[in-house]
Amino acid sequence: MPVTLFDLIVLLVIVFSALLAMVRGFSREIMSILAWGLSAVIGYFGYPYLAPPLENFLGDDRIAMAGAFAIIFLVALILISLVTSRFADYIMDSRAGALDRSLGFVFGVVRGVLILAVAVAFWNWLVGDAQSPDWIRNAKSKPALDILATKLESLLPGGPGPEASLPGDQLFAVVDGNVIAIIPPAPHLPA
């Protein structure tokens, strides 16, 4: 098997992710993930308070809910990122800076491989191996990414598609073969 364009793309994604994480540092990468997660939680619990005024303005409750979530999420993300960037800068400037960058490089490699495995899982689900072009099907890195994608899929509560069953509220659904986002119901507000 010769090296294909897919293998070069895999290499570029991993190297880019690793170098980016090395420059940013492990602490900044972890704090970024935490900032996104915390912002999503704040958006989820905060959008019911902003959605009614937006609904009066926009006239559509679904757009108002999505807009309210997006506004609260972005404001929270900006504010949290301002705080976490100061802390990450402190770590980068300390004696632990070299260790932070080294761990960041390792984190970047792992993140790049996971991103590629998820991309391959979606590719296999949407296109399939039989309909893949030769430069993907014959890539040296494809079998390893297929194995990792299969292991990641086994961790999911249900397979992709209409038969997927998630406990509680679903965030996505398949309607007429199209994946659509579903805004979960608002948490109960105090009366």
Image: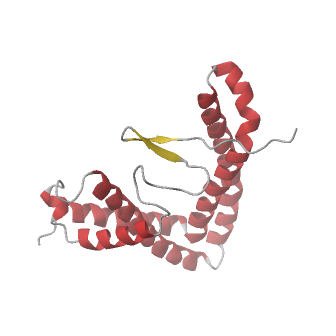
Q: In this view, does 169 lie to the left or right of 147?
A: right
Q: Which one is in front, 83 or 6?
A: 6
Tell me what residue is drawn at x 42 percent, y 69 percent. 154
Q: In this view, does 58 lie above or below 184?
A: above
Residue visible at 58% across and 57% down? 167
Q: Residue at (60%, 31%) from the top-left corner?
A: 62
Rendered location of residue 95, percent (x, y): 64, 79
Q: Which residue lies furthest to the right in this view?
A: 191
Colour mode of the rendering = secondary structure
Q: Is residue 36 left or right of residue 21?
A: right
From the viewer's side, name the closer residue of 166 and 5. 166
Task: Specify the quadrant of the image occupied by residue 16.
Answer: bottom left
Task: Residue 93 in the image: state x and y as whole percent.
Answer: 64, 70
User: Residue 28, located in which quarter of the rendered image?
Assistant: bottom right
The image shows residue 22 at horizontal and vertical percentages of: 48, 69
The quarter in which the C terminus is drawn is top right
Left or right position of 164 against 28: left
Q: In which quarter of the image is the N terminus?
A: bottom left
Query: Residue 51 falls in which quadrant of the image?
Result: top right
Seen in the picture, residue 35 relative to 144 is either above or below; the reply is above
